[in-house]
Image (cartoon, rainbow, N blue to C red):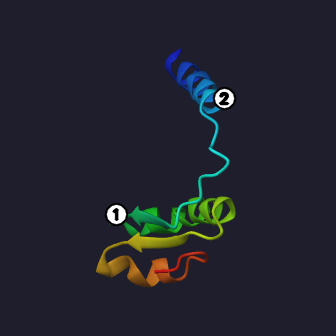
Amino acid sequence: YAGIPFVFFLGLWRIKKHKRAENFNPAGIAILNISSIGDNVLMSGPVQDLRRAYPQAEITVFCGDTNYSVVQLIPGINK
């Protein structure tokens, strides 16, 4: 039962220890998501977080043919 709280606090310690570099500005971000349609729908939140954190970056998603129409509907994706 102690595993989940332990991992949570370990994650907080890691975030505090490793802050994001101030001058880190990636030119592009690639996301590989070839899973089911639900995974691609849930990807919309993290894509928005990436867009807010790195507005200049080009976000590219690699997905399967069956999920392409869903990925096109997610705002913030360039390709």
Whether residue 20 sits left or right of residue 69 in the image: it is right
Label 2 or label 1, whichever lies nearer to me, is 2
Whether residue 25 sits left or right of residue 39 in the image: it is right
Could you say which is closer to the camera, residue 45 or residue 52? 52
Number of numbered markers? 2
Name the disc covering residue 16, or none.
2
Look at the numbered disc 1 and give the secondary structure of its residue. Answer: loop
Could you classify mark 1 by the number of other residues whose Cα lies within 10 Å: few (under 14), some (14-19), or many (20 or more)? Answer: few
Q: What residue lies at 35% left-to-right and 72% top-to-bottom?
A: 63
Could you classify mark 2 by the number of other residues whose Cα lies within 10 Å: few (under 14), some (14-19), or many (20 or more)? Answer: few
Is residue 66 placed above or below 8 in the rendered structure?
below
Could you say which is closer to the camera, residue 4 or residue 50? 50
Q: Three-letter amino acid code at disc 1?
A: Ser
Q: What residue lies at 44% left-to-right and 62% top-to-bottom?
A: 39
Residue 43 position, x and y percent, is 52, 63
Look at the numbered disc 2 and give the secondary structure of its residue. Answer: helix
Q: What residue lies at 60% left-to-right and 75% top-to-bottom?
A: 76
Could you say which is closer to the camera, residue 67 or residue 52? 52
Of the two numbered discs 2 and 1 on the same chain, state the one appearing first in sequence: 2
Is residue 79 placed above or below 22 in the rendered structure?
below
Is residue 78 placed above or below 10 in the rendered structure?
below
Determine the CA span between mark 2 and mark 1. Answer: 32 Å
Q: Three-letter amino acid code at disc 2?
A: Lys
Whether residue 36 sits left or right of residue 74 in the image: it is left
**Residues marked 2 and 1 touching at CB (< 8 Å):** no
Residue 21 position, x and y percent, is 62, 44
Q: What residue lies at 53% left-to-right and 14% top-to-bottom?
A: 2
Which residue position is annotated with label 1?
Answer: 35
